[in-house]
Amino acid sequence: MINELLPLAEKVAIRLIAQKQTIAVAESSTGGLISAALLAVPGASAYFLGSAVVYTRQARRVLMDIPDAEMKVEGVRSSSEPYAELLAKQIRSRLGADWALSETGAAGPSGNRYGDAAGHTCIAVAGPNQAVMTLETASDDRLDNMHMFASTALSFLLRMMTPIG
């Protein structure tokens, strides 16, 4: 899986190194694939500050310092665009990164307790450009979804890193 993500990760790395910028990652249903791809590129220590696999409520509380009360804000729940945005902003702030990438979803084979089907994920980028998106693969294949989520997240990051104008 990492080998297929490596070309995208290399493009991200080239941009970050050229601009002397850094990145931090908070991911959930990709299980660390995004971080692994970025770290597989030689020279990752020049741009990669760290990451967290935020898979549980306890991980959200401890690793991201997002208390339950903050999750009670309207629209903020796991596997949602507001939550993906919150994760990206939080990991960027906590690690002092120029860029942050987050992912939160339901890889499968079943959906999540919020009613999202397998193959649903939300991805956010926080940095000089900020954006959030939702992907629905319509697949219940866990491994395929994990790969698709990671690939889409890296591609989305690349688009957001492209200078405007």
Image (tube, rainbow, N blue to C red):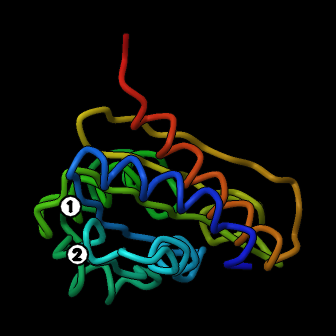
Asked if disc 1 and disc 2 are in contact, CB closer than 8 Å, the reply is yes
SS category of the residue bearing label 1: helix
> Along the horizontal axis of the image, is 123 left or right of 43?
right
Identity of the residue drawn at 21% across and 87% down: 62
- Mark 1 or mark 2, earlier in chain: 2
What is the x, y in percent for residue 60? 30, 78
Badge 1 crowding class, 10 Å Cα cut-off, few under 14, some 14 to 19, many 20 or more, is many
Identity of the residue drawn at 39% across and 47% down: 15
Q: Give the position of the N terminus as an image quadrant.
A: bottom right
> Along the horizontal axis of the image, is 123 left or right of 94?
right
Position above or below: 55 against 127? below
Q: Nearer the viewer, residue 32 or 72?
A: 32
Residue 115 visible, this angle: no
Q: Which residue is mark 2?
A: 64
Residue 47 visible, this angle: yes
Identity of the residue drawn at 31% across and 32% down: 129
Q: Nearer the viewer, residue 102 or 44?
A: 44
Q: Amino acid at mark 2?
A: Met
Badge 2 crowding class, 10 Å Cα cut-off, few under 14, some 14 to 19, many 20 or more, is some
What is the x, y in percent for residue 121? 62, 57
> Along the horizontal axis of the image, is 149 left or right of 164?
right
What is the x, y in percent for residue 20? 20, 52
SS category of the residue bearing label 2: helix
Q: Measure the alpha-carbon separation of dots 1 and 2.
A: 7 Å
Position above or below: 135 against 28? above
Q: For residue 2, which quarter of the picture?
A: bottom right
Identity of the residue drawn at 33% across and 35% down: 130
Q: Amino acid at mark 1?
A: Gln
- Which numbered dot is residue 90? 1
